[in-house]
Image: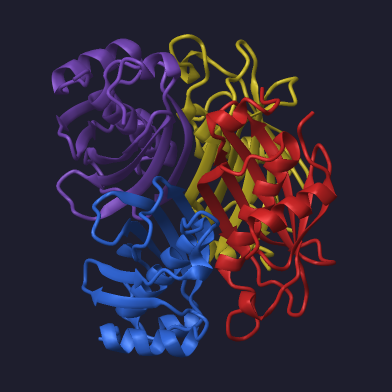
Chain colours: A blue, B red, C purple, D yellow
Amino acid sequence: MTGLGTQELNDYLAAVFPEAVGYRVEAAAEDELRVRLCVGARHLRPGGTVSGPAMFELADFAMYAAVLSRIGRVALAVTTSANIDFMRKPEAGRDLVASVRVLKLGRVLAVGDVMIRSDGSDAIVARASLTYSIPPSDRKNGGLA
Amino acid sequence: MTGLGTQELNDYLAAVFPEAVGYRVEAAAEDELRVRLCVGARHLRPGGTVSGPAMFELADFAMYAAVLSRIGRVALAVTTSANIDFMRKPEAGRDLVASVRVLKLGRVLAVGDVMIRSDGSDAIVARASLTYSIPPSDRKNGGLA
Amino acid sequence: MTGLGTQELNDYLAAVFPEAVGYRVEAAAEDELRVRLCVGARHLRPGGTVSGPAMFELADFAMYAAVLSRIGRVALAVTTSANIDFMRKPEAGRDLVASVRVLKLGRVLAVGDVMIRSDGSDAIVARASLTYSIPPSDRKNGGLA
Amino acid sequence: MTGLGTQELNDYLAAVFPEAVGYRVEAAAEDELRVRLCVGARHLRPGGTVSGPAMFELADFAMYAAVLSRIGRVALAVTTSANIDFMRKPEAGRDLVASVRVLKLGRVLAVGDVMIRSDGSDAIVARASLTYSIPPSDRKNGGLA
């Protein structure tokens, strides 16, 4: 098994994305991975709402973490497409929590769904689906189906 | 006519998005609007590539500018959905240029396409389609069909 | 409450979509609605796989049924956008089953997620997200948040 | 060059999609391919509008034709994802015309944009972006970058 646990994921992500401040993988299970975004000034629009691009970044980061958690360190995996629906205003002064489910982990493509909620709330603020491309050299290392 | 010209757009966007440093609307015509992103350190992934979230932000910003250019100052217009395909690595050390076409400007929803290229290149780095929701109070001011 | 139960849904859908042969709403609960597609020759590609457009039609039909189940007969609700990922080949000779979750039911837009599986299998064949626009005249009748 | 011209495309598509009645590739150039859908009863919703799934099928067919026109007979190319925005009601009693631009033709994935209009009208009825996966055995034959 070449996947990564929660601590390894956080260490690796901090190393490859030094600019990604405020993200923390909280749980990495086979069926779902959870990432918390500690919302800061740089994520806010005037008025105090988390911006759309900040939520996109959270979804993208969370899907990348989910791919790593399954196949290990594949620094070159890249997003090939993403679709995101913004449905509700996040609650003011709360962290955002993204839950990822990997729906497919193929030889070439990984597909996952991300639901973003305000911490402590059940209402879905945004949903995203993302496709990552996994480069051949990294695929050799992984346990991809 | 309640739309905005290039200078008015840049002034208004700087006022409502003080954090959006590095963007400049270069041309705002009926059929196409163009936004340049002066790529800086905060937009880069390790290795020097512009990050996916930075390109998403550029597409989102450009579509918002295109809506403003047509219907004037609608601070509350919000993105309801976005779809983005990342197709090529941007060229190192170049600005990115986004070209927007507004495909629909209805009473409730505006839909547009965005093509992102490296400055000076014809190859499309990313394409996005975005839907904005226009709040009723702002719609009264605009000339929406 | 103006929503519809399973039997009412099937009767209404057969009346407004007489051409939609082979679909049956099997369960309509608050949190999930399920539609079965009895796969026939017209849904197949050469080789026996269900075609992409047939799966799109199933997802679209299922989301429409889910909207009706919540707000009643709104014949004029229309799809405004859809995103679909095809992930696996459906199993030969099996029905397809679509499970819908309505993620947002607003005054103007309804957003939902659809997972399509081969009957009896857990593997997700396709996932879709769809947005429906609900016309104002119909909205007055419904219990929309 | 292994691509196909207009006549070859129509012959090949009729052979591999015998059920796809009513489609005709009208022009296949390097930068754009055009497909006409002769709208018939099976494409209509009650009221006479072309259904969303019929427009999805047209977009999917047109993108497949565009891939074939560039790399030849790759029967196993499959749609991996699609995004479609429905923007206007098609005009009654008119054919639909889809214009495809292939934005990327890579070793593994092809990405294209499709604009659908009512015949004789400039207004865009629907826009779609589609990604096709090209199987390795077929890729060897093609001139893919």
Determine which quarter of the picture holds residue D23.
top right
> Residue A79, relative to residue C62: is it above or below?
below
> Residue A123, relative to residue A69: is it above or below?
above
Q: Nearer the viewer, residue B44 or D63?
A: B44
Please say whether residue A33 is visible from this viewpoint. yes
Q: Nearer the viewer, residue C107 or A29?
A: C107
Residue D45 in picture, x, y percent from top left? 45, 16
The quadrant of the image that shows the N terminus of chain B is top right
The quadrant of the image that shows the C terminus of chain B is top right
- How many marks are shown on the rendered structure? 0
- Determine the residue positioned at 29% across, 10% down: C15
Q: Nearer the viewer, residue B116 or B21?
A: B21
- Determine the residue positioned at 21% across, 73% down: A29
> Residue D109, relative to residue D94: is it above or below?
below
Residue B62 in picture, x, y percent from top left? 69, 52
Determine which quarter of the picture holds residue B131.
top right
